[in-house]
Image: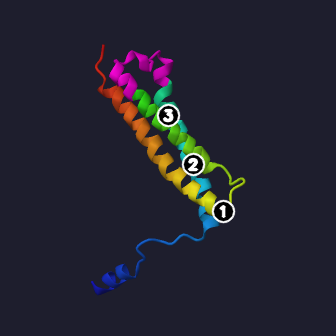
Amino acid sequence: MSDLHEARESLPIALPYEDMEAETERIIRTGTIWLGAVAVTAALLLGPSVASGWRPTTLPMVFDVAWWLGATAAAIGIGLLVWAGCPVLGFRLPDAYRQKVFSIRVGIVLSLSGMAFSGLVVLLAPVG
């Protein structure tokens, strides 16, 4: 029992990042993966609906506006993921690092929550 307790005590609370350059490269790499995952998810969720003739304008006005708010949030999130995945051009490393950290964090949250919100709006909208 004491060995387990000692092992747990010796673990770091959070792993330190290597250095700013390595972290920026990691964000660029994972940003492109997140962008691909979000783009495929959006296409799989929205593509069949649009192909079958559904349009957001078929929703009641309140739900239509809510759907567009979610879609706008998702689009801004996708834009931020694009920025997170782009190589660093013309910015000093500390500035690029700060931009990439913000872009990937906010981009993931906005894209996923925007898609989830828009999907929830469609599910909650009255039929007819």
Colour pattern of the rendering: rainbow
Q: Name the residue beneath numbered marker 2.
A: 33
Question: Please, what is the three-letter code of the amino acid marked with disc 1?
Answer: Leu
How much space separates mark 2 and mark 1, taking CA atoms? 22 Å
Say whether disc 2 or disc 1 marks the residue closer to the N-terminus: 2
SS category of the residue bearing label 3: helix
**Of callouts 3 and 1, the N-terminal one:** 3
Which residue, given by chain and number where applicable, does mark 3 sit on? Answer: 42
What amino acid is labelled 2 in the image?
Ile
Task: Label 2: state its secondary structure.
Answer: helix
Check the image and report above or below for 74 versus 7. above
Foreground of the two, 31 or 20? 20
Report the magenta residues as a range: 48-66
Going from N to C along the chain, the mark reached first, 3 or 2, is 2
Which quadrant is home to the N terminus? bottom left
Q: Is residue 54 magenta?
A: yes
Which amino acid lies under the numbered mark 3 shown in the image of this protein?
A: Ala
Between the C-alphas of marks 3 and 1, the distance is 32 Å
Say what secondary structure mark 1 lies in: helix
- Asked whether the beta carbons under mark 2 and mark 1 sit within 8 Å of each other, the answer is no
- Position above or below: 12 against 103: below
Q: Position of residue 57 (x, y in %)?
A: 42, 17
Q: Residues within 10 Å of mark 1 (few under 14, many from 20)?
A: some
Q: Is 3 situated above or below 118?
A: below
The dot on residue 20 is none
Name the mark on residue 93: 1
Please state the horizontal and vertical placement of residue 69, each as a whole percent of the image: 42, 31
Q: Pinpoint residue 30: horizontal percent, then vertical percent.
A: 57, 53
Do the CB atoms of the residues marked 3 and 2 lie less than 8 Å apart?
no
Residue 44 in picture, x, y percent from top left? 49, 32
Instruction: Give the foreground label among 3 and 1.
Output: 1
